[in-house]
Image (cartoon, grey):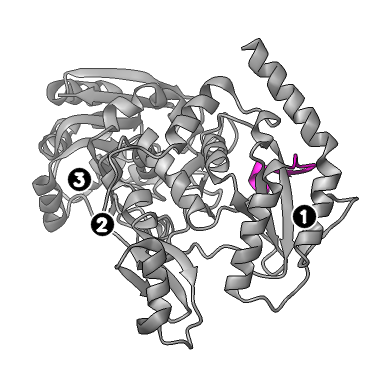
């Protein structure tokens, strides 16, 4: 091991010694590239290059900079992963979090099986010699060109072997990330002056792992040693989506649902990131109580979130490996927020029902679906109140008789004593004792005998009695 390390150090010293010479030779060989000795950035000034010319320059960049140690740095959060890069990040999410086989991952189903492999002038007839050039080179027949000239190689093959990014993830998770060892081959980042975004030209597997670990709050916003190339185009790479769902997917984007209400979060890389004061509303306090048992309740299970609000716990269930999640939300505005998240992040595992738990047709749909796990966050006392007001039921026992038939396994419930002004109504006030924790626990025991109080959330939100997180199993 020591011998290997000494050899590596000698190699690095030699590289640094030859650095200036190699850069100078690269600039001479590639007339479209300039180099700034102060910023240590490379740049392309020619604004009239077509796609084939850009691809040729990119190949030269990848080959020539491979042996040159970088002097520039960029923060992980400042790198914008384009299509293909965000697909690789999502692959990590689907394999590590959701345990999916390769043929169910976006990476293999879409990115690898509909790969953009080049560009051809769309004014040239593609069904003649132009197409034959690609077929002869690739030894593949199933090739298509879109109306912009981008050429896609179509396939239905799903490799059994996992992508190498998984092994890299395990290594970095175990040994941590080394900026210096990682400079060979170096990370190369492109900076588009047209979009002002920094995108990945080389090192996408390392950056995918680092961005994934960042989204899981396992690493800080590291500075990465990298070569940075500026150019006056949107991109230097032809990689782009083929299917409509992939075109619309914004897995690497950020969507903020706002800070108001009891779900204070934003979505990054398809993952709900909670925030807000430790002792305030927003989700952090509930999450601290339920996170230790959450995966066991949702992993590979079919989940229903009753009163899903903005979808925080739906996303957490998907993150922790639920096979599917259904959000039942009576308010169209909140359901619209969940639907926007579903569309932006291409969450096909997320279903939305705009409806009332007590509506006969809605309830029948839930009954027929037979879920594994049900969520009731901040809503169980509302369901009892509404049931009493509608003359449907009177007690928690009555309510659990409706809840129990629609789940095969678990419930996760936030219990609180109500303090709403509606209880000033003399009719409703007569039933106030029916809302007690004692009555709740009695009904929970009857239908979910293996249950536990996970602890109190200390914030006060409309009541003075505290909120407690319970789970129960049949």
Boundaries of the magenta span: 68-78
Question: 67 or 472: nearer the eye?
Answer: 67
Asked whether residue 145 is in view, the answer is no
Numbered mark located on residue 26 in the image: 1
Residue farthest toward the right in the current orientation of the protein: 38
Q: Using the numbered discs, state the Cα–Cα distance from disc 1 to disc 2 in whole angstroms.
A: 40 Å
Q: Position of residue 72 (x, y in %)?
A: 78, 44
Q: CA distance from mark 3 to mark 1?
A: 75 Å
Identify the residue at image location x=59%, y=24%.
176
Q: Which of the pair 46/91 is nearer the observer?
A: 46
Of residue 241 and residue 311, the one placed in the foreground of this image is: 241
- Looking at the image, tell me whether mark 3 or mark 1 is earlier in sequence order: 1
- The answer to which of marks 3 and 2 sits earlier in the sequence is 2
The quadrant of the rendering that contains the C terminus is: top left
Asked if the stretch drawn in magenta spans residue 77, the answer is yes
Q: In terms of secondary structure, where does tag 3 sit?
A: helix
- Report the disc number at residue 387: 3
Q: Position of residue 148 (x, y in %)?
A: 48, 79
The residue under the point 66% across, 29% down is 181
Assign the N terminus to one quadrant of the image: top right
The residue beneath circle 2 is: 156
Looking at marks 1 and 2 on the same chain, the residue that comes earlier in the sequence is marked by 1
């Amino acid at each position: 091991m020591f011998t290997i390390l000494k050899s590596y150090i000698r190699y690095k010293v030699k590289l640094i010694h030859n650095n200036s010479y190699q850069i100078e030779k690269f600039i001479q060989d590639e007339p479209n590239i300039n180099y700034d000795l102060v910023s240590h950035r490379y740049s392309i000034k020619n604004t009239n290059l077509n796609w084939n010319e850009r691809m040729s320059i990119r190949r030269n960049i990848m080959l020539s900079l491979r042996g040159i140690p970088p002097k520039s740095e960029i923060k992980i959060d400042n790198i914008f992963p384009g299509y293909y890069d965000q697909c690789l990040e999502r692959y990590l999410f689907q394999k590590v979090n959701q345990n999916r086989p390769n043929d169910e991952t976006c990476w293999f189903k879409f990115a690898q099986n509909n790969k953009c492999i080049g560009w051809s002038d769309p004014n040239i007839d593609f069904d003649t010699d132009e197409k034959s050039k690609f077929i002869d080179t690739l030894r593949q027949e199933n090739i298509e060109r879109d109306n912009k000239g981008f050429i896609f190689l179509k396939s239905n093959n799903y490799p059994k072997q996992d992508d190498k990014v998984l092994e890299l993830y395990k290594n970095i998770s175990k040994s941590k990330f080394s900026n210096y060892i990682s400079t060979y081959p170096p990370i190369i980042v492109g900076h588009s002056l047209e979009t002002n975004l920094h995108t990945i030209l080389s090192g996408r597997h390392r950056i995918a792992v680092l961005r994934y670990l960042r989204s899981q709050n396992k690493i800080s916003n590291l500075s990465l040693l990298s070569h940075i190339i500026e150019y006056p185009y949107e991109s230097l790479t032809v990689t782009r989506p083929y299917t409509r769902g992939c075109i619309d997917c914004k897995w690497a984007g950020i969507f903020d649902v706002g800070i108001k209400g009891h779900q204070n979060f934003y979505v990054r890389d398809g993952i709900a990131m909670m925030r807000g004061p430790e002792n305030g509303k927003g989700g952090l306090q509930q999450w601290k109580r339920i996170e230790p048992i959450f995966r066991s309740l949702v992993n590979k299970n079919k989940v229903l979130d009753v009163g899903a609000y903005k979808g925080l716990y739906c996303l957490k269930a998907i993150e922790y490996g639920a096979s599917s999640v259904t959000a039942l939300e009576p308010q169209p505005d909140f359901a619209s927020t969940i639907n926007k998240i579903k569309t932006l992040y291409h969450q096909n595992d997320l279903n939305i029902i705009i409806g009332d738990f007590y509506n006969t047709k809605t309830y029948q749909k839930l009954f027929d679906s037979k879920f594994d796990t049900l969520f009731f966050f901040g809503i169980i006392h509302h369901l009892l109140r509404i049931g009493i007001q509608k003359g449907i039921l009177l007690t928690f026992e009555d309510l659990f008789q409706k809840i129990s038939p629609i789940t095969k396994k678990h419930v996760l419930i936030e219990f609180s004593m109500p303090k709403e002004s509606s209880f000033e109504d003399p009719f409703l006030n007569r039933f106030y004792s029916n809302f007690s924790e004692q009555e709740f626990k009695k009904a929970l025991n009857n239908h979910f005998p293996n249950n536990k109080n996970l602890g109190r959330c200390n914030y006060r939100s409309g009541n003075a009695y505290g909120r407690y997180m319970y789970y129960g199993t049949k």
